[in-house]
Structure formats: C-alpha cells, structure tokens
Amino acid sequence: MKEEMNYIEERRGGDGMPELLTVREAYGKLRISKWMLYRLIRSGKLVSIRIGRRRLIPARAVSELVEQLSRESMV
C-alpha cells in the first residue's frame, strides 16, 4: 500500500495527476495477455490502484517493470 501511495503522489503534467493506464493499455504496451498482467499485479511485481471497480496502472510502474526485467535478464 505504501508503494502504491508513492506512485499516486508522483506528479506528472500540468494538471498534477500521475499518468494512469487502463488494464488494456498496460497489457498492450507490454505486449502480454490480460491474464499475465493480472498475474504480475497479484504477485506484487506491478503496482496498480483501484478506483471504484476500475483497476489502473501508473505508467511509471510499467516502465519500472520493464527496467527491472531487463536488468534481471542481463544477469
């Protein structure tokens, strides 16, 4: 939860809101299935937030996941 709050507090753009992606946008950017995206969220590897019934993913979380996986693949 604390990690999620850090993403929420991060500001982007002039409106003061972080860039949030829908589930469809996030799995499209990562080129993975919807189910794989949910698996990453459940495992804690990808941060997401819920607003009502919607699940949104901070764009920065997607970028950080790609960076982390890139570092791991170099080892």
Image (cartoon, rainbow, N blue to C red):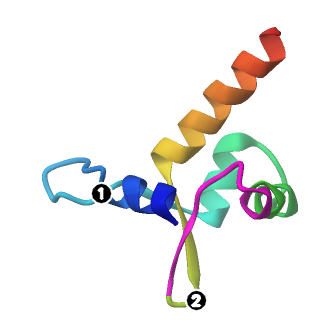
Task: Give how far across and how far down residue 6 sits, in percent.
Answer: 39, 54
Magenta-drawn segment: 41-51
Secondary structure of the residue carrying tag 1 is helix
Left of 54 or right of it: where is 8?
left
SS state under label 2? loop
Residue at the spot x=56%, y=81% of the render? 54
Which of these two is toward me, 35 or 49? 49
Q: Is residue 23 above or below residue 55?
A: above
User: Disc 2 to disc 1, how far (Cα)?
Assistant: 21 Å
The residue where tag 1 is placed is: 9
Q: Residue furthest top?
A: 74
Residue 53: numbered disc: 2
Please state, as top left, top right, bottom left or bottom right, where the C terminus lies in the image: top right
Q: Name the residue type under label 1.
A: Glu
Marker disc for residue 66:
none
Mark 1 crowdedness (10 Å alpha carbons): few <14, some 14-19, many ≥20:
few
